[in-house]
Image: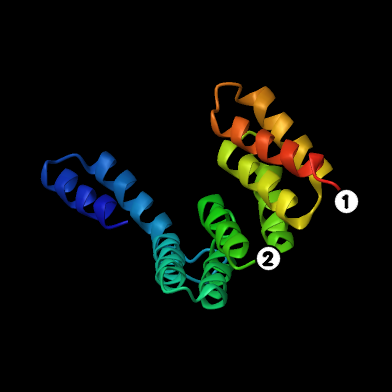
Amino acid sequence: MEAHLNRAIVLSDLGRPGEAAEALAQAQELGRPDSTGFPAVVANRLANMHADLGRAYKEAGAYRAAAAQYHSALEIRPGFADLRLELARTLLDSGDPDGAGRELDEILRGRPDWLDAMLLRGLAAYLAGDLELAQSVWEGASERHPEEPRLETYRSMLARRVGEPS
């Protein structure tokens, strides 16, 4: 927003009123409140601040507090898939593979080819004991990303678990 405002001032000083008006209109648009009640740049900053606090809590081993901060970030910006992935990792680290799976399913609805989300979704299923889903997700990842070396590790892990006596 500020960059567009500064651009409008410079363009006006250069005697380019049409371009200045366009830059000013862009600055005003970015300064309008969105569905959060905040201007987009402010809402983005708040969501990222919650995420930063979530990372600090996670680093300290406070997974519940970390997850709460990621949830707060996602209330402001539900479309920030990278933050949802961090939440899923935090939930996995805290021993909640089902919660992680729900978050990863949400990501994969919008970005079905995102390799990191696919790998983590398979791992969440594996840790939850749903070996069929884990296999299915990892096979899908392998079809889309055949060059991915981590898939061999996951397949070996799954093969060992399937081969264990009940």
Give neighbour class at mark 2: few <14, some 14-19, many 20+ (Cα, 10 Å): some
Residue linked to disc 1: 166
Along the line of sight, the residue nearer the viewer: 138 or 99: 138
Question: In the shown orientation, is residue 150 left or right of residue 164?
Answer: left
Which of labels 2 and 1 is toward the front?
1
Q: Quadrant of the N terminus?
A: bottom left
Q: Is residue 126 left or right of residue 79?
A: right
**Cα–Cα gap, marks 2 and 1:** 23 Å
Please tell me which residue is depicted at 17% across the width and 47% down the height of the picture. Answer: 12
Mark 2 lies on residue: 96
**Mark 1 residue element:** loop
Residue 70 horizontal/vertical position (percent): 53, 67
**Residue at 74% across, 50% down:** 125
Figure disc tally: 2
Name the side, left or right, on which 123 lies relative to 25.
Answer: right
Q: Residue furthest right?
A: 166
Q: In this orientation, which residue lies closer to the viewer: 50 or 145?
A: 145
